[in-house]
Amino acid sequence: MNHAAEDAHAEGSGRLFLFIWILLLAFTGIEVVLTYQNLGVHLMLLLLMGLSVVKAYLIIAYFMHLRYEKPSLAITLIPPLVVVLCLLFLAFPDSLRLLHLRPR
Amino acid sequence: MASEDVMHAQDTGASAWGGGAAPYAIVSKKLGMWLFIISDAITFGSLLFAYTYVRVASVQWPTPFRAWPSIANASLMTVVLLSSSLTMVMAVRSARIGRRSHAVRWLFATMIGGIAFIVLHAREWMGLIDEGVRLFKNPWGTPLFGAAFFSLTGLHMTHVGIGVIYLAVIAFGQAAGKFKPEDVEVSGLYWHFVDLVWMFIFPLVYLMSARLG
């Protein structure tokens, strides 16, 4: 592991945290602005989810310190979570089927 | 990686996975909190999925959130929670470098952020209930809007409330010198997780249901 980065993190990168916070606020602002751009539903969802994943990465990696832990921890925690969440998506076609079954 | 007070594999001369050393080089209470966070993330993922499922399957999903006051209020809540994550990370840093009184102050700042979030959220709930939104009934469209909205945001608000209590315990314990820096860090993990969930609730529930035009 990069010791310089570790020491910077451990001892005094209040500035790094401030920078991450500003990034998070900026992405939130972008999301709010996007809301009023009258984009299509799918594009909107894609952009919002993409930005949310970026924000999630920033919080997990820097605020929750995962970037500075052993890689094995991240590998143990994150991929299974992603797999489980993707498994949920398998049921989405069912909701579309329900939509089309509605009486007109 | 000498920052954690655990038995490192390199100290015992054994493999990291052979037993006798902390495999991830972290204290077990931290690993325990991470595992809890992953399981709780799945719970919130399921609720978010259920919300999305019901929304996709319905013909007339309400979009009641006007720019003012609803989206503005939700955006303010997001800023408040993100700022509380910043104060939390400062608390962990202060605890790590041994400045206990600073850590306690940062912890109190985080708690205030959490309480502010709950107050803003509760006011919003009262506003919606006043407009006639119930669990299975609302004046605008699909009856399940209320159930989906209140259960998702309600569970999140409960987590924030529990977090505030948890942080109070840690703050008072820190002030009394009872807890170690790693205890502050573990409580920080929980708090950041609560913020993380909101990062997904805010766009999916509020921004996607904003009243446009």
Image: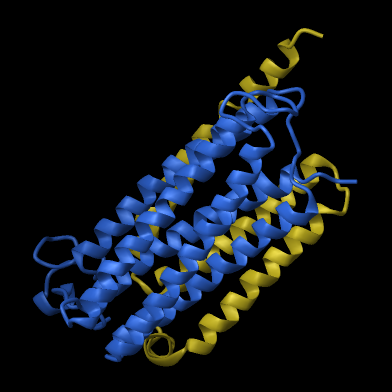
Quarter of the rendering containing residue A84:
top left
* Residue at x-position 60% and y-position 32%: B146
In this view, B119 is above or below B135: below
> Is residue A1 visible from the viewing direction of this image?
no
Q: Colour of chain B?
A: blue
* Residue at x-position 35% and y-position 88%: B102
Residue B201, percent across and down? 59, 49
Q: Check the picture and name the quadrant holding the N terminus of chain B.
A: bottom left
Quarter of the rendering containing residue B155:
top left
Quarter of the rendering containing residue B28:
bottom left
* Residue at x-position 63% and y-position 52%: B202
Residue found farthest to the right: B213
Q: Nearer the viewer, residue A35 or B162?
A: B162
Residue B186, percent across and down? 30, 67
**Is A87 placed left or right of B128 in the picture?**
left
Q: Colour of chain A?
A: yellow
Residue A41, percent across and down? 80, 40
In this view, B42 is above or below A3: above
* Residue at x-position 59% and y-position 52%: B123
Number of numbered discs on residues: 0
In this view, B79 is above or below B145: below
Residue B105, percent across and down? 37, 83
**Is B142 placed left or right of B17 in the picture?**
right
In this view, A13 is above or below B88: below
